[in-house]
Image (cartoon, rainbow, N blue to C red):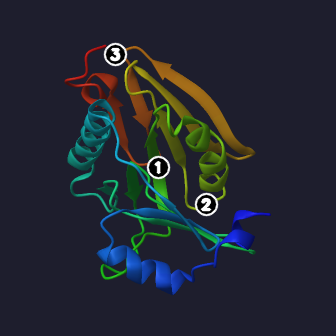
């Protein structure tokens, strides 16, 4: 029996309404809710550093950096998903009163043992279907290494940036991020 058969499916409207007052955040996949757990301090530090570095470099640009409180909606022909990435950059924002963003240009997930399989598997597959997405980053929290999926004419190309002295070039949003800033305060 599938999860969808075991539980009553939740409508998008019910999910969005409940999520506004819930003390626990949930990701939404086709009517099924998945509670999210909190991250370790190193995970939160890397995510905060990444958000802050992007935010400071994007000032004055139409693109804005958002933290992990921002939901991203992904619509497929047969279902809708809502995820809370660790960081996102949106250059064409939804209305300010909306509860989610539809058109991220960049999404970041900081990997952890509990989320690695999902972040590198089903989330990566879902994120890479977003028409506006230019770059998907997966950041290792305890090792200076970033896995980059960058949109090319024939799909997404994977590359790896490693070393604390490396620079992560993101011409898609007009910035460069030193890995040294992403890992500021992290014992490597």
Kindly state the secondary structure of the residue where label 3 is placed. loop
Relative to 126, residue 10 above or below = below
Q: Mark 3 or mark 2: which comes first in sequence?
A: 2
Relative to 67, residue 57 above or below = above
Q: Quadrant of residue 52?
A: top left
Seen from this angle, which residue lies furthest right? 1
Tell me which residue sits at (32%, 57%) in the image: 66
Q: Mark 1 or mark 2: which comes first in sequence?
A: 1
Please name whichever residue, 175 or 65, is drawn nearer the observer in this view of the structure: 65
Please name whichever residue, 110 or 172, is drawn nearer the observer in this view of the structure: 110
* Left or right of 40 in this view: 83: right
Please name whichever residue, 33 or 75, is drawn nearer the observer in this view of the structure: 33
Q: Position of residue 188 (x, y in %)?
A: 31, 13
Q: CA distance from mark 3 to mark 2?
A: 30 Å
Tell me which residue sits at (61%, 37%) in the image: 117
Marks 1 and 2 in Cβ contact (< 8 Å): yes
- Identify the mark at residue 130; answer none if there is no mark: 2
In the picture, the quarter occupied by the N terminus is: bottom right
Report the residue marked by disc 3: 164
């Amino acid at each position: 029996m599938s999860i969808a058969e075991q539980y009553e499916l939740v409508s998008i409207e019910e999910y969005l309404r409940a999520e506004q007052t819930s003390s626990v955040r949930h990701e939404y996949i086709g009517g099924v809710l998945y509670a999210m757990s909190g991250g370790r301090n190193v995970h939160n530090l890397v995510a905060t550093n990444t958000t802050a570095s992007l935010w400071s470099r994007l000032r004055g640009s139409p693109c804005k950096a958002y933290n992990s409180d921002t939901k991203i909606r992904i619509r497929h022909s047969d279902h809708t998903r809502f995820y809370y990435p660790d960081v996102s950059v949106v250059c064409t924002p939804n209305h300010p009163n909306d509860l989610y963003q539809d058109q991220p240009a960049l999404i970041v997930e900081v990997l952890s043992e509990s989320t690695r399989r999902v972040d590198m598997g089903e989330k990566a597959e879902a994120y890479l279907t977003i028409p506006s997405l230019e770059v998907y980053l997966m950041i290792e929290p305890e090792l200076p290494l970033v896995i980059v999926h960058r949109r090319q004419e024939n799909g997404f190309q994977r590359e790896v940036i490693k070393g604390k002295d490396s620079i992560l070039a993101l011409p898609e949003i007009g910035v460069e991020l030193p890995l040294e800033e992403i890992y500021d305060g992290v014992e490597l």
